[in-house]
Image (spheres, rainbow, N blue to C red):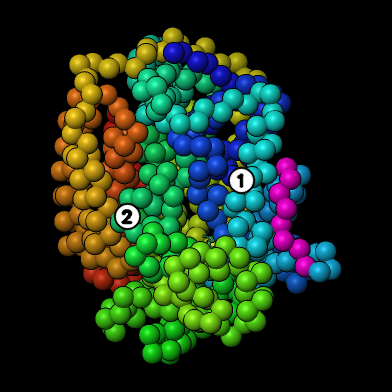
Amino acid sequence: MNITTDFLVIGSGIAGLSYALKVADSGQVAVVTKREMSETATNLAQGGIASVLSSEDSFAAHVRDTMVAGAYLSDEDVVRMVVQRGPQAIADLINWGVRFSKKDDNTYDLTREGGHSRRRILHAKDMTGQEIERALVEAVKSHPNITVYEHHIAIDLITDAKAGTVKVKPNRCLGAHVLDITESKVHTLGARVTVLATGGAGKVYLYTCNPDVATGDGIAMAYRAGATVADMEFMQFHPTTLYHPRAKSFLISESVRGEGAILRRKDGTAFMEQYHELRDLAPRDITARAIDNEMKIHGDESVFLDITHRDPDYVRNRFPHIYETCLKYGIDITVEPIPVVPAAHYICGGVKVDRWGESDLVNLFAIGEVAFTGLHGANRLASNSLLEGVVFADLVAQRSLARIKEKHHPIPRIQPWDYGKATDSDEEVVVAHNWDEIRRCMWNYVGIVRTSKRLKRALRRIQMIKDEITEYYWDFYPTSDLIELRNIATVAELIVRCARMRRESRGLHYNLDYPERDDANWKKDTLIRKKL
Ligand code: SIN
């Protein structure tokens, strides 16, 4: 099937849906999403969305906190722009129907998280993302110009260079080939503007609090299509996910520490004081490394997060989701500390975009975790990501609305997907094995603490797996497992290559062979672009 639309949005979290709502009055929007619309990382976000809303806060303080957390690698102009646009982004969300938690006096309840010097995080109890996703999904469903393709996964972007039909310079993005997972058919989706809003890549690691959809699809597709990718070495490990054999790295929000929880060793000793003056509210890279260190020194399988000193009614009411989930695993957080370990959480790098969210492939935009805007630097400040998603959705909307009014080369006729001699795969076991091998290799060799030798070893292994997948991939009909496997292999390779380039330790990238920050040589981004 051949479909053409004005705006193609790949992904249905906060970034993709905000963008769709911003452009829908001006054209036809197709939203492609791999599972059901709300199965996104946004939906799992607990903590909240940061913005300067209190008279005790200031834009300057939010900018400073972001720069400090990001180990001064963030682009300060971008940081300032995002921070200053924060209150408008919050107003947009409220207009779309998001209900943030309020205090008894009807003002918004602002919480704190690691690295924030002020209370500036809006939340909906401990289910902020779920509330945002609910409101956006409802608004999108009721807009007549938005068509949502659930259970459809993008395979690859279509570009002028790839289509080979017209010699347009610079290379443009023309849409994407998309697999209808239920029907096992590949459709061609042509679009004037293509927006990647595919989220992150936590599934590249064995332990992650990301949902299953976080396989780095947008980053991998953009890289394959020739767009520049930046700063992939900065994978953020969330310090506190529940340590329990059945819990699949369930997130324990940083706002629990924001409301006073203390990290302790097995013997009850609080340890964060030894690592940072902000103690339990230190930036995330420092806290995750501290926990990793404590576990290694003491040979413990986890550390413990203790909020038992707070009033039990307060804890149950403020963190109902965390309370109920822990209770399901036999832990009553009002009377006992929570066993926690770090897990992969957020990729700070991604598809390099300009101030308007456009990549270096014309008409290809990226918003949210898939994008590298320059906001996060070497370590994202907690709760800045939802904010970035809404702010850049607005900027991309402005730019793409202007773009579709410009004179343009028509979209050429795009060839349908070439199935070649593909057959149905009867070797699912190969796919499953490769998935596991990549994720284990990344966890063991490219984790919180790295060495040059381990990175080299990881690159060798991942490249071997990648070669195997390329062979395998073209022999069989595409399935979503295979498409995702190909993407995690690409993203894993990009992470390792960026990590090998950066010969220093900064923020989330800590290499024992280069333990110091080296501003003279490395206060710059790592950039990778595929030669086409
Ligand atoms: C959390 O609730 O701890 C996650 C917030 C974030 O990653 O921004």
Q: Is residue 340 magenta?
A: no
Query: Residue at 31% across / 30% down in the picture?
Result: 479
Q: Is residue 368 above or below residue 185?
A: below
Task: Give the mark toward the camera: 1 or 2.
Answer: 1
For this rendering, which residue is in front, 303 or 271?
303
Query: Residue at 37% across / 62% down in the picture?
Result: 246
Magenta segment:
96-103
Sequence-wise first label, 1 or 2? 1
Give the position of the C terminus as an image quadrant. top left
For this rendering, which residue is in front, 122 or 67?
122
The overriding secondary structure of the stretch rendered in magenta is loop
Query: Residue at 47% across / 80% down in the picture?
Result: 337
3D distance between C-alphas at marks 1 and 2 = 25 Å
For label 2, the residue is 205
Q: Secondary structure at mark 2?
A: loop
* Residue 175 position in % (x across, y down): 46, 23
Residue 304 lies in what quarter of the image? bottom left
Query: Dot 1, crowdedness within 10 Å: few (<14), some or many (≥20)?
Result: many
In screen coordinates, is 145 left or right of 270? right
For label 1, the residue is 133
- Amino acid type indicated by mark 1: Glu
* Residue 116 position in % (x across, y down): 60, 70
